[in-house]
Amino acid sequence: MLPFRLFVAAMLSVVAFHALCQTDSSRAERLQSVAALIQRGDLSGAESQLQSLLQQSPGDPLALNLLGLVRLQQRNTSEAERLFKSALASGHKIAGPHINLAMIYAPDRPLDAIAELHQALAIAPQDKQAASLLRQVARNSAAADIERGEKDKALEVLSNARAVLPHDPELLYDSGFVAFECASYQDAENWLTEALKLRPDYPEARYALARTYLAENLAKPAEEEMRKYLSLKPDDATAEYGLGYILMAEQRLDEAKIAFEKSLTLQPQQTESVYQLAEIASQKGDNLTAQNNYTKVLARDPRHGGALTGLGVLAYRAGKYSEAKADLEKAISAAPDYQKAHYYYALTLSRLGEKTEAQREFAIAKSLQKEHGGEHHLLAAQP
């Protein structure tokens, strides 16, 4: 169950409170006193006063709601749910019981929780705690669904939450993030763009939009968004790495090199930036620098498939086919789905006269060719 202490302060913050209590100020003071007791954890004192109030007025919705919170603290969830529903059955427009029912439903019934919060916000549109709980329920439920591989359920939960708060930047960001994970890149782009219209200085949305553009093979917009992100978070080593990767996709190798070097200045142990510097050196024909950087990567991570492949490629280019074969076999063992390793392994086998095996590896390499090859490393590096 979600922690409910955050919501105790608002349990009497209801539209009907003054209407219910304006004719009896002493009763209003007693209810406020009970709320304070619950906040302090004095459940027996709170219950004693509530039972007295309910003897005088058995259907008092505010007292029923507060007693429900006492039962919730006592982990008597079924009784708490009954009391919250009884408070709502009074017919008074009270947001508190809807919020408290949402807390009960959140772990296992997120759609029901969102429906209760919809009711709460219809009664009290400015209730920040109800809005906060709505975001929390949607985010937690979507994350759990994604972890279980139930991406459609994650999108459904977020869709229901957005129906309640359609112009909420956080829900739009969460929706964009999940859409990205579902490879629904156009939806991700739309929701993240909308989030940024509402909150231009939303760094996480900028980063996520850069990832989305890169997945769509739109390197220039990806670069623009990553630079905007870095203007907000200039010391983010991961983002500098991301910028470097985007610049590599644009074949702007010298600028990419500067970004990776800055990333390493900010975070010296960032292995992936060293690897990308090796890739740049390899592309520029600086084989010695490339080999040195691949070796540094492997000193930190002996099973780095990219670095093992890089050494194999250098050996292949130098005509050292037996050495290339050994390196590339290690690369494939470490990263079986790395297309480049299989491709160069096929070339190497062909040079060694192993034609049948070479054709098999060419076929594997073709099957592994990515539709969105530019996104792989950036996705692994999030802020």
Image: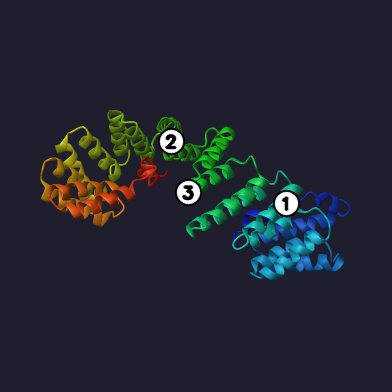
Q: Can residue 274 be seen in this view?
A: yes
Quadrant position of residue 5:
bottom right
How many neighbours does mark 3 have within 10 angstroms: few (below 14), some (14-19), or many (20 or more)?
A: some
How many neighbours does mark 1 have within 10 angstroms: few (below 14), some (14-19), or many (20 or more)?
A: many
Instruction: Determine whether, in the image, residue 37 is placed left or right of residue 275.
Output: right
Q: Can residue 270 be seen in this view?
A: no
- Residue 120 — which label? 1
Q: How many labels does the image show?
A: 3
Q: Quadrant of the N terminus?
A: bottom right
- Identify the amino acid type marked 2: Lys
Instruction: Determine whether, in the image, residue 284 is placed left or right of residue 323.
Output: right
* Observer-nearest of 364 and 37: 364
Q: Name the residue under label 3.
A: 181
Q: Is residue 139 above or below residue 1?
A: above
Q: In which quarter of the image is the C terminus?
A: top left
Of tags 2 and 3, which is closer to the observer? 3
Instruction: Determine whether, in the image, residue 339 is placed left or right of residue 69.
Output: left
